[in-house]
Image (spheres, rainbow, N blue to C red):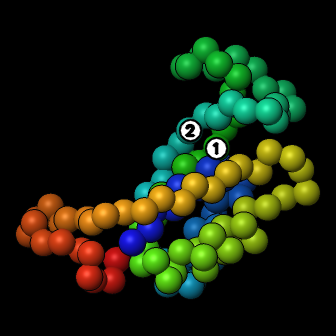
Amino acid sequence: MKEIKAFVKPNRIRRVIEALTDNGFKSMTLSQAEGTGAFKAKGAKPSLDFHVTNSPVVKLELVCQNEEAQSAIDIILKNGKTPDPGDGIIYLSEIEDAFQIKTGKSLKRYDL
């Protein structure tokens, strides 16, 4: 299994989620986040919460089967990209296993 973490601009996240859902990726987690990096958004200001440069992003996390990962990445790239710099980043990690809390069963061999 693979875990995909994508940091996407808030104004593109709905488009990314809809495209992923339309292509069978139904389970994902979203979190509001702030990022710092080489790109500084116009109007970036110190954050009241973190005291660092404020560049709002949405962190999208999903786990999928190995053979589905490239499709999910392509969907995020296509729908998250804008003409402006600083669109975000995608991380891909290996997941050894996942367990359902209610049953304790491994999800390694099942569709997510």
Query: As drawn, is 104 to the left or to the right of 41?
Result: left
Binning the other alpha carbons within 10 Å of mark 2 as few (below 14), some (14 to 19) or many (20 upward) gives some
Residue 4 percent location from the top left of the image: 51, 61
- The residue that label 1 is drawn on is 57
Amino acid bearing label 2: Ala
Residue 96 occupies quadrant? bottom left
- The amino acid type, in three-letter code, at marker 1 is Val
The answer to whether residue 68 of the structure is visible from this angle is yes
Q: CA distance from mark 1 to mark 2?
A: 5 Å
The image shows residue 81, relative to residue 36, as above or below, that is below
Q: Depth check: 64 or 25 in front?
A: 64
Task: Identify the residue at image location x=54%, y=20%.
Answer: 49
Identify the secondary structure beneath mark 2: strand
Task: Please tell me which residue is depicted at 84% across the width and 27% down the height of the picture.
Answer: 43
Residue tagged 2? 33
User: Which residue, as the protein is rendered here, is positioned at the far right?
Assistant: 83
Residue at (70, 17) in percent of width and height: 46
Along the line of sight, the residue nearer the viewer: 6 or 92: 92
Where residue 3 appears, x then y in whole percent?
45, 62
Disc 1 is placed on an element classified as: strand
Q: Residue at x 48, y 59 (%)?
A: 93
- The quadrant in which the C terminus is found is bottom left
